Image: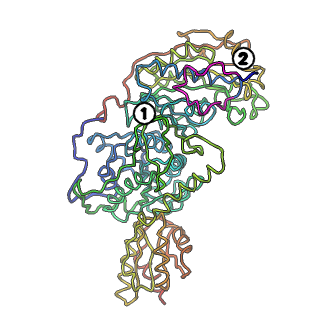
Amino acid sequence: MSGEIVVNAHPLDDLLRADRLPHIWCPGCGLGPIMACMANAMADSAIPIDKHVVVSGIGCTGRVAGYLKVDSFHTTHGRPIPFATGLKLAKPELQVTVFSGDGDLFAIGGNHLIHAARRNVDINVICVNNFNYGMTGGQAGPTTPMGARTSTTPYGNVDPSFNLPRLAATLGAVYVARWTSLHVRQLEKSIRRAIKKEGFTFIEVLSPCPVGFGKSNNLGEGLDEMELYRTNCVVYPEADLSQADIELKHDSTIIVGDFVDIERPVYGAGGGEE
Amino acid sequence: MAVATEERVLTGQQFMNGDVACAEGALAAGCSFFAGYPITPSTEIAERLARRLPAVGGRYVQMEDELASMAAILGASWAGAKSMTATSGPGFSLMMENIGLGMMTEVPCVVVNVQRGGPSTGLPTLVSQADVMQAKWGSHGDYEPIAYSPASPQEMFDLTVKAFNAAERYRLPVFVLGDEVVGHMTERVTIPPAAEIDIVDRKRPSAPPDDGWLPYAPDDDLIPPMACAGEGYGFHITGLTHDERGYPTGDPLVHDRLVRRLSRKIQVHANEICEVEKLHTDDAEVVVIAYGATSRAARHAVLAARERGIRAGLLRLITLWPFPRGVVKELGNTARRFVVAELNLGQIAREAERYTRLPISLVNHAGGMMLPPEVILRAIMEAEA
């Protein structure tokens, strides 16, 4: 390597805290492209960047808030949704996006997600699902497929896993989608739709975690798992979400798409009188 | 936000219970956001604000639990609102997680704990004062809290206003440690005209947004000015140890500097925060230390002792944290003995021991009932003997 600077700037420099790079994510992690989708969607939205707020919980995805150059909050484990609820209700002009992981949002924070969706608070939730607790070194979580090996399921995971889009749809989320870190164009479009949509939106994004999960489950490196997404994902927006469980095996399909787009009264839209 | 249809400040003579007075104090202080979860004996605060906040253009949100309530008021504060929650012991326990986040990231807000008997579910409808040390040490790590101890519905109003002002002035979650008796007692509450109520607002950045702004650069008073979300500052806030930019760091020196400042910003202002009421302490040989509901019984006991010719005095603690150590030290030079009366197993008695060599008699009960004045009087007489 010559150390020669190839480009002086990145197109997203204005939206990233360049002084915090390089980021802490492992080689092969999908969070980089997912975060870029978010940055692009914010830049393309009709809403001024100053009004965009990103709230994260704890974990690898929780670090997204620290790299996006908007008002951003790295809160406590599981609590980004109620924190975001307070922000949004106290200042409705803010465009509030919760960016956090599957463990943060569905294990320790599961109750908050359920109730924010029920209320239809006008926030966007982007859940990066890497099927394990990556930050702590690869333990099983609520999305770990049955049978998967992790450091806390050495004999294979015996817990059934959550099907996140199905759960979100059941709770009344007005927009529900699932993509992977491979589907960057579709994901960016989904985030743009979520930003425009009034009410509680939910996007699940599958991401390789080669260090925490891939290695111990025959998924190979990050690129190998991206290849698995390429060959096994089926875009099927009309899917019966009860059939959208993820086994994450080489011979099983992964259903992705924009699944739900409905209208429901938005929480607090009428000010304090409702 | 909705249009106000009612007066924010109910100026005049009111007859209300302590919980309702607390809610009115919050409104008078400028509270515009309440997130909470019903719990005895604090529920009347939520009920009052559920009705009153929308009518003055504010927002009431009933959350799914106290974890969420605390998180929501932090978020609302970052949106620029003066925010509050109210709870009792079990809920206070759940709030400790995000109280820590509020301490670490310096978020003005008010947490009211109308104390009941504990541990655990304890005595839901009955009085105690056993959360004093939880208020001091409840969340992990070192920090220096501010906690007020109201002894009447009037003080539930007055000290809630002060709690908001202290939260805004010093940038932290501030506690009002009420108790079931004071919360449910109905008395006259005098609410001053709005213009006569002292209101403090948080320090704001003096310069418009630019790339060089440091969200955690403190002024000389050790308190950093606070920008709010959506104003263009583009700040990052984290519960991780952070530098003046707000960026996370694992540097032990930065950690030490930050945690020391979080405590010192309160310690250096302790004299302006600490409040006590003294009754007959100048020549007192026996000084009763009491606070909250118990101080009412202690006052009767001290006056009864005086009638018997005993030189007794009352030191009523209005702030429990920071602990008014200076006044305890001073009285230790003139009195012969302290009596601490409280509804716990000696939480303030043990704290007082740190600041005096005088003997301390503890007259207490674990909670569920008030200490009768006669019991405190007996302790004074035994101490004097």
Q: Is residue A19 magenta?
A: yes
Quick one: SS at disc 1?
Answer: loop
Please state which amino acid type lies under the numbered disc 1: Gly
Where residue B157 appears, as percent x and y from the top left, is 32, 58
The part of the chain drawn in magenta is A4-25
Report the disc number at residue B151: none
**Quarter of the image where the C terminus of chain A is located:** top left
B47 vs A188, nearest the viewer: A188
Instruction: Using the numbered discs, state the Cα–Cα distance from disc 2 to disc 1 in whole angstroms.
Output: 38 Å
Which residue is under mark 1?
B232
Same chain letter for marks 2 and 1: no
Magenta highlight: main SS: loop
Residue B150 appears left or right of B54: right
Which residue is under mark 2?
A223
Q: Would residue B33 be visible to someone looking at this image?
A: yes
Disc 2 is attached to a residue of which chain? A
A155 vs B220, nearest the viewer: B220
**Quarter of the image where the N terminus of chain A is located:** top right
B98 vs A148, nearest the viewer: B98
Where residue B30 appears, as percent x and y from the top left, is 32, 48
Disc 1 is attached to a residue of which chain? B
Determine the residue positioned at 41% across, 60% down: B178
Please state which amino acid type lies under the numbered disc 2: Leu
Q: Is residue B39 magenta?
A: no
Quick one: SS at disc 2?
Answer: helix
A30 vs B123, nearest the viewer: A30
Residue B57 appears left or right of B279: left
Q: Would residue A120 be visible to someone looking at this image?
A: no
Relative to A65, say whether B238 is above or below. below
